[in-house]
Image (cartoon, rainbow, N blue to C red):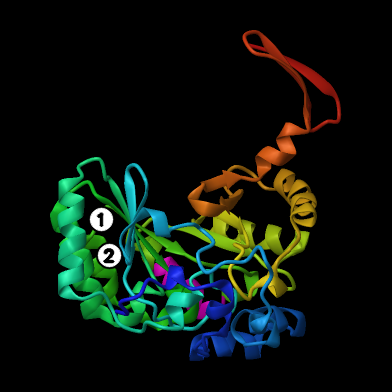
């Protein structure tokens, strides 16, 4: 892996990096078979555009502020009880809105033996760590054997280390979900699969088969989605996506406001519009199908629920130790007594 931390580059330098272009055969098939509007939404996610070279003053190479939490370039300890492991900068297809584009443009290697040894040693020395996110790039892009090595070594640390496997593989490369991979995931429990899914048209037959195979193997799944201009920034698309996932047995976990990564402004839905959209969508989703609408605060501030901005306007009066009055979903102000 590259010696220099990609987070140290300027936004302009990051946008100028040549981003890889790769559209997997499975995703290309979805594009070709989808209805015209859906096909456009899929193509926008993976086809390069001139907008990638445009940089605004609020954009950065490190929109999550991970740099100050780095133990190594590829191990991030931001939250007290969990760490992030970045296994590679390589992906199965390249999303044009990626917030780690400085990594994906520069590093195609997979985490090596010595780097992994450092990660294992750090977790062992910090017993407060109970969870690890295995991410990238895409951890499934290195092939089965490399993923197997990482998962086996992590599982050997302690039986109750919760592993989150963050990947676009069910969408970009569903053929990877072989019996061999499913057996590995089962042996690595407790493990959750965290697929990134942005649009209902991504749930083709092969993609559903891969996700269903995981569910049938007893692998719990929680999805995450990014709100993207021209892709899924409308009420019907989001409702259909989250309802479809819930029907499959997949819990929608997060809907993220797009991070201010260098060269991604053409995908950004203005926050005011995003909040108005979520106000329409949220009441039409049950607790089973409703993700948390969130943003990563800059400079390492962590995740923040954007629903709080909506709810705060509905609080009419609050008495700290006794009651509050709030606007209910019926349009009437109600008093709730503690």
* In the foreground, 277 or 318: 318
Give the quadrant of residue 12.
bottom right
Q: Position of residue 266 (x, y in %)?
A: 72, 74
Q: Is residue 104 above or below residue 32?
A: above
Element type at mark 1: loop
Q: Is residue 330 left or right of residue 147?
A: right
* In the foreground, 113 or 233: 113
Crowd tier of the residue under label 2, counting other residues whose Cα lies within 10 Å: few below 14, some 14–19, many 20 or above: many
Part of the protein shown in magenta:
204-213
Quadrant in which the C terminus appears:
top right
Q: Position of residue 62 (x, y in %)?
A: 50, 64
**Residue 1 visible (yes or no):** yes
Q: Identify the residue position indicated by label 2 in the image.
A: 185
Q: Is residue 58 magenta?
A: no
Residue at 72% x, 83% y is: 40
Dominant SS of magenta comes to helix
Residue at 32% x, 43% y is: 81
Q: Identify the residue position indicated by label 1 in the image.
A: 189
Residue at 16% x, 73% y is: 113
Quadrant in which the N terminus appears:
bottom left
**Residues tagged 2 and 1 counted as in contact (Cβ below 8 A):** yes
Q: Is residue 311 left or right of residue 60?
A: right
Give the quadrant of residue 44.
bottom right
Residue at 31% x, 71% y is: 87
**Residue 95 visible (yes or no):** no
* In the foreground, 166 or 111: 111
* In the foreground, 164 or 330: 164
User: Residue pushed farthest top?
Assistant: 322
Q: Is residue 207 magenta?
A: yes
């Amino acid at each position: 892996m590259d010696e220099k931390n990609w987070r140290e580059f300027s936004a302009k330098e990051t946008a100028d990096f040549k981003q890889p272009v790769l559209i997997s055969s499975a995703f290309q098939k979805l594009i070709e078979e989808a209805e015209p509007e859906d096909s456009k939404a899929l193509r926008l996610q993976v086809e390069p555009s001139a907008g990638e070279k445009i940089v605004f003053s609020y954009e950065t190479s490190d929109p999550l502020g991970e740099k100050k939490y780095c133990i190594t370039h590829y191990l991030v300890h931001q939250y007290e009880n969990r760490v992030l492991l970045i296994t590679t900068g390589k992906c199965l297809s390249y999303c044009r809105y990626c917030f780690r584009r400085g990594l994906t443009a520069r590093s195609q290697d997979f985490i090596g033996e010595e780097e992994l040894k450092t990660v294992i040693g750090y977790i062992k020395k910090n017993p407060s760590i109970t969870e690890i996110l295995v991410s990238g790039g895409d951890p499934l892009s290195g092939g089965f054997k490399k993923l197997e090595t990482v998962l086996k070594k992590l599982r050997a640390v302690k039986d109750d280390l919760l592993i989150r496997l963050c990947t676009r593989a069910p969408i970009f490369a569903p053929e990877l979900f072989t019996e061999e991979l499913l057996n590995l995931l089962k042996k690595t429990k407790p493990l959750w699969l965290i697929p990134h899914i942005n649009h209902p048209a991504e749930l083709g037959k092969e993609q559903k088969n891969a996700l269903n195979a995981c569910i049938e193997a007893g692998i719990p799944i929680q999805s995450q989605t990014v709100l993207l201009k021209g892709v899924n920034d409308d009420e019907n698309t989001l409702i259909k996506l989250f309802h479809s996932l819930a029907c499959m047995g997949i819990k929608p976990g997060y809907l993220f406001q797009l991070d201010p990564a260098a060269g991604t402004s053409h995908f950004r839905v203005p926050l005011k519009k995003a909040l108005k959209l979520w106000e329409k969508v949220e009441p039409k989703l049950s607790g089973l199908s409703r993700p948390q609408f969130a943003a990563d605060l800059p400079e390492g501030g962590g995740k923040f629920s954007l629903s709080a901005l909506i709810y705060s306007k509905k609080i009419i009066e609050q008495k700290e130790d006794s009651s509050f009055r709030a606007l209910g979903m019926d349009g009437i102000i109600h008093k709730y007594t503690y």
